[in-house]
Image (tube, rainbow, N blue to C red):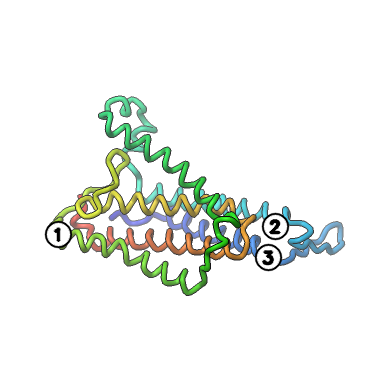
Amino acid sequence: MRRPDPATIICVILGILFLTIGYNFATLPHLVVWLDQHQRTFTRANNPVVFWIPAIGAFAVAAICLLVAYHLHFRVQLAHALIQSPAILRRLPFTRRLWLAIYLTSAVLTVWRGYKSLSPEKTAHTNSDWIFVSITFVLACLFPLGAVAYSRLVGVDHFRRPSLDRHPFGWWRDTLQPLRVTVIGTALYFLGACFALPHANQRGVMVFWFYVALALGLFIGERAVYLFYRVRIA
């Protein structure tokens, strides 16, 4: 596994920083500023835009930073080649082009579903708390390692790196492919939820943190897989 370069580390740090800033603005009860040497207090009830615009902006910047970090550290060769030479797409077999189209379409739909999932109607019957979020994070970190360990038990010696041109259903024989799809899917779901957070109620906020725990846990678990099984990844 390639070591993260300084640019990747900086992007991750900036992403976490802007996530924190966005969360602080999203939960801040009031804001005191100085205008023309006069103190003015903005409250969430009277001036919601003052709080939600910076929050959405910070979440958007955080998402961009984390996506850039992901791109820098895990370059998808096919996507990079398509950017450099679109003619490659015409030489791909039909099934590979089909899966590429499915993945791109699914990415857009996943962001949209993440956005809609924090609506009060969707979260009315949820009861997420910090204990549930913490357990989710731990289990999400362990799940990728467990999936790959099971594949080893059933006789898989080497694993193919994920790509955009094959199906994601081979959990026990092609484990890294569905695992990467799951990691990216949860990250996109989280990204969509970031844009809905300003309008979410308290239950929606806890569901948002569940998404954070799930996406971050799976990401850490996947990195652990690439670290522990690097000699078996072709």
Q: Nearer the viewer, residue 154 or 7?
A: 154
Among the 4 quarters of the image, the one containing residue 86: top left
Mark 1 residue type: Val
For image coordinates 66% across by 54% down, the residue present is 54
Q: Nearer the viewer, residue 19 or 85?
A: 19
Mark 3 residue type: Leu
- Which badge, 2 or 3, comes first in the chain's sequence? 3
Packing grade of label 2 (10 A; few <14, some 14-19, many >=20) is: many
Which residue is identified by label 3?
28
x and y percent of residue 62 in the render? Answer: 53, 54
Viewed as shown, does residue 180 lie left or right of 53? left
- Which badge, 2 or 1, comes first in the chain's sequence? 2
x and y percent of residue 70 in the render? Answer: 41, 51
Please report contact status of discs 3 and 1: CB closer than 8 Å, yes or no. Answer: no
x and y percent of residue 174 in the render? Answer: 22, 50
Q: For the N terminus, give its image quadrant.
A: bottom left
Please report contact status of discs 2 and 3: CB closer than 8 Å, yes or no. Answer: yes
Mark 2 residue type: Phe
Please report contact status of discs 2 and 1: CB closer than 8 Å, yes or no. Answer: no
Task: Label 1, secondary structure: give it.
Answer: loop
For image coordinates 51% across by 48% down, the residue present is 64
Among the 4 quarters of the image, the one containing residue 44: bottom right
Which residue is identified by label 2?
51
Question: How far separated are the C-alphas under marks 2 and 1?
Answer: 52 Å
Viewed as shown, does residue 197 lie left or right of 186? right
Which residue is identified by label 1?
154
